[in-house]
Image (cartoon, rainbow, N blue to C red):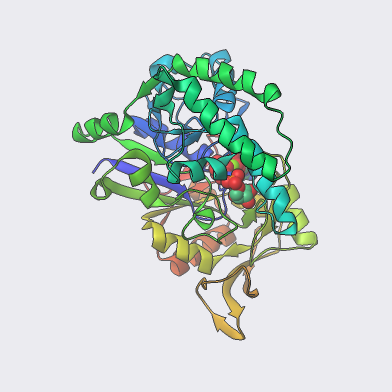
Amino acid sequence: MAVDVLLGLQWGDEGKGKIVDVLTPEYDVVARFQGGPNAGHTLEFNGIKHVLHTIPSGIFRDNTINIVGNGVVIDPVTLKKEIDALVKMDVDIRKKLFISRKAHLIIPTHRLLDAASESSKGKEKIGSTLRGIGPTYMDKTGRNGLRVGDIEAKDFLDRYKKLSAKHSEILKHMEFECKLDELEPQWFEGIEEMKKLNLVDSEHIINRYIGEGKKILAEGAQGSLLDIDFGSYPFVTSSNTITAGACTGLGIPPGKINRVFGIFKAYCTRVGSGPFPSELNDATGEQLRKAGNEFGATTGRPRRCGWIDLPALKYAIMINGVTDLIMTKPDVLSGFDKIYACTHYIYEGKKIDFLPYDIVNNEVKPVFEEIKGWRESLTGINAESQFPKELNDYITYLETNLQVPLSIISVGPDRNQTIIRKRF
Ligand code: GDP
Ligand code: IMO
Ligand code: MG
């Protein structure tokens, strides 16, 4: 039993990057299993703030191998930028970073198709990060995609041109301007950079490590409510963000999954369109956005804010088989006299305590329970014994409702602002 999984239980941006970085010293390998540069995972340490999009969040720690798995989609342009930034910080990419040959490539026209699709949807747009994620996964499942391993093939350029030409035809039909001359040089530079990396059959490496009893942490991107199957479809991303995604996205047998760390904010946020039952479209929502600095790490867009949503969390816990909960950002709630938890929904005139099938076309009204807040700042706390009583009460309330232990509480963005309640 060698693989633990860490993933988001809400609509993304729960603080996955920070916590993976905190947990990395306990692991031999950190591996991303899905998503692509739509992700923005923020790490803070030694006064440095760093955002990763493709590369796993274990990359800053010595002695840990970082793998970008087959389930990930890679944009060579973003990857090169990430690598350049890490090399500047003296991170030994050659030694520590491995990329699956089976990961799919985002090509410039995928990004254009994403933009064309969104603009054709008008008011119904997904609010995509426009990084080409959807079109790339469409080509993967449509069996037309280009994979990382293809860049080593003699006819790679022909294969690229064939796919790109196909996309250009579609873009022409959609009357979407396609200025490839501006995009391709950078993309091919990224491909040249990728050729210098460790391109591997990562499923073999991971399973060898499992056999040797080494510890592996699988890092999720996005959040469970953005999952292609179980999220608020169609306002979702195009991959399986849940625990099962770690199996298909890395080649891990299901029986080898050990702990599942489910991470959530002490409140809730969402970027992009789609239902968000506990959203606050008022001054309190604004206050949360300001206090939590809730702006997207990838696009800079303001995040929509609301209270914690317990039926949605319970659903995510069920789908993922969460064994340990991790809460981030309770420090943002300091100074709120009262906080609230959404415990039920009013749906089709009835009070229900579960996430129903269609929250997109049917109204889901939240029912909130009031909880006493805390005044004290939490950011300097370094032991659980220093928690205000009301925070302890909130933790007990959540554990009682969610029926899973809260093992880690994060009280600020820095690596050190982390309270481990239970060792694993
Ligand atoms: P991810 O996508 O799940 O890795 O999360 P993001 O990096 O997109 O967003 C989380 C944001 O919250 C980042 O700016 C983090 O630096 C910050 N953060 C993480 N944990 C905490 C915390 O406990 N308190 C505060 N105030 N900020 C946090
Ligand atoms: P991390 O890993 C928050 C959202 C987008 C949009 C929808 C589809 O940082 O938590 P896509 O680009 O996949 O076509 O967008 O999903 N989204 C995220 N929201 N955090 C993310 O990643 C996200 N990745 C995608 O805003 O609503
Ligand atoms: Mg993020």
Tell me which image quadrant ligand 3 sits in: top right
Q: Is residue 36 above or below residue 360?
A: above
The residue nearer to you, when weighing 283 against 125, is 125
The residue nearer to you, when weighing 105 against 358, is 105
Q: Position of residue 59 (x, y in %)?
A: 46, 26
Q: Position of residue 349 (x, y in %)?
A: 62, 86
Q: Position of residue 100 (x, y in %)?
A: 38, 29
Q: Is residue 43 visible?
A: no
The residue nearer to you, when weighing 388 against 49, is 49
> Farthest residue toward the bottom?
349
Query: How many marks can you see?
Result: 0
Q: Is residue 211 above or below residue 118?
A: above
Task: Name the side, left or right, on which 413 lies relative to 104.
Answer: right
Residue drawn at the location 27% of the way across and 49% of the way down: 254
Question: Image quadrant of residue 394?
Answer: bottom right
Q: Quadrant of the C terminus?
A: top left
Residue drawn at the location 40% of the way across and 18% of the way down: 152
Q: Is residue 2 above or below residue 355?
A: above
Residue drawn at the location 59% of the way across and 19% of the way down: 85
Task: Name the side, left or right, on which 175 lies relative to 393.
Answer: right
Question: Image quadrant of residue 114?
Answer: top right
Q: Is residue 300 above or below residue 51?
A: below
Q: Position of residue 79 (x, y in %)?
A: 54, 25
The residue nearer to you, when weighing 356 against 368, is 356
Q: Quadrant of the N terminus?
A: top left
Question: Image quadrant of residue 37?
Answer: top right
Q: Is residue 61 visible?
A: yes
